Amino acid sequence: MAVDGDIDRAVSRAAAVLDAGGVILYPTDTIYGLGCRAADEPAIGRIYAMKRRPPSRPTLILVGSAGMVARFVTGIPPAAAALMERFWPGPLTLLFTAAGGISPLLTAGTGKIGIRLPAHPFCTKLSLKCDDAIVSTSANVSGSPPAGGTADPVREFGRLVDLVVEAGHLASLPSTVADVSGGELTIMREGAIPARKLHESLGSDS
């Protein structure tokens, strides 16, 4: 189904699928992703199997509001709060120390959880509708390039997921990933937001 026609209808249908333990192929503000509820470990396992993703690689989650972050972390360091204020909603994933109860598939045993507040209304509305974070991992086989359009993901995963949500071509650059779990900024992956901008926002050079 397409988001463009009626986003609230698309959100309601996707939420029903996720609440029933399903997996969706859906748009974010960066690339197409595979997702399920963050609390649904069997569905997370399905996604890892679909992508042929090794369990040693963690997977981030999307939240519907900045206020939801506290449910999934042990604390929000000042540097993280500053970056959230400056760059959220948007293509910045922040790594926090994970709270207890987070699936080890999401943390890959690191004790850290990647969280992002996306700038796409479908994602934020879906998270709020489900009252849970939504797992977000690129809709591609592990190790292959992520896709900004739906043609390749649908061909690869269309018969494996429970719902495909389309929104045309997307930005195609993945989010920048920054570790703030220790209170300082460490760039793990440079993506849509240049690392320089993150350092400048905190008044640091490294």
Image (cartoon, rainbow, N blue to C red):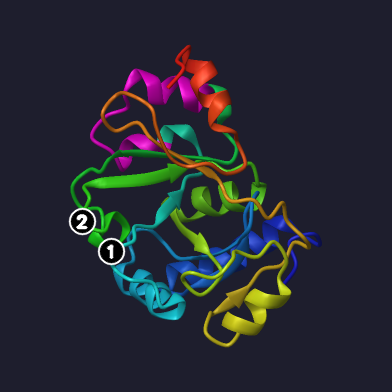
Type of amino acid under label 1: Ser
As helix, strand or loop, the secondary structure at mark 2 comes to loop
Q: Residue at x 32, y 46 (%)?
A: 113
Q: Looking at the image, is 156 positioned above or below residue 76?
A: below
Query: Residues under labels 1 and 2: Cα distance?
Result: 8 Å
Give the main secondary structure, helix, strand or loop, of the magenta stretch: helix
User: Which residue carries the number 1 mark?
Assistant: 56
Q: Between residue 5 and residue 99, name the one nearer to us.
A: 99
Residue 13 locus on image (x, y percent) = 61, 68
Residue 47 locus on image (x, y percent) = 42, 73
Q: Looking at the image, is 154 positioned above or below residue 137?
A: below
Where residue 135 sits, quadrant-wise, is bottom left
Which range is magenta? 68-85
Residue 142 locus on image (x, y percent) = 46, 71
Instruction: Pick out the residue farthest to the top.
Output: 203
Quadrant of the snapshot with the C terminus: top left
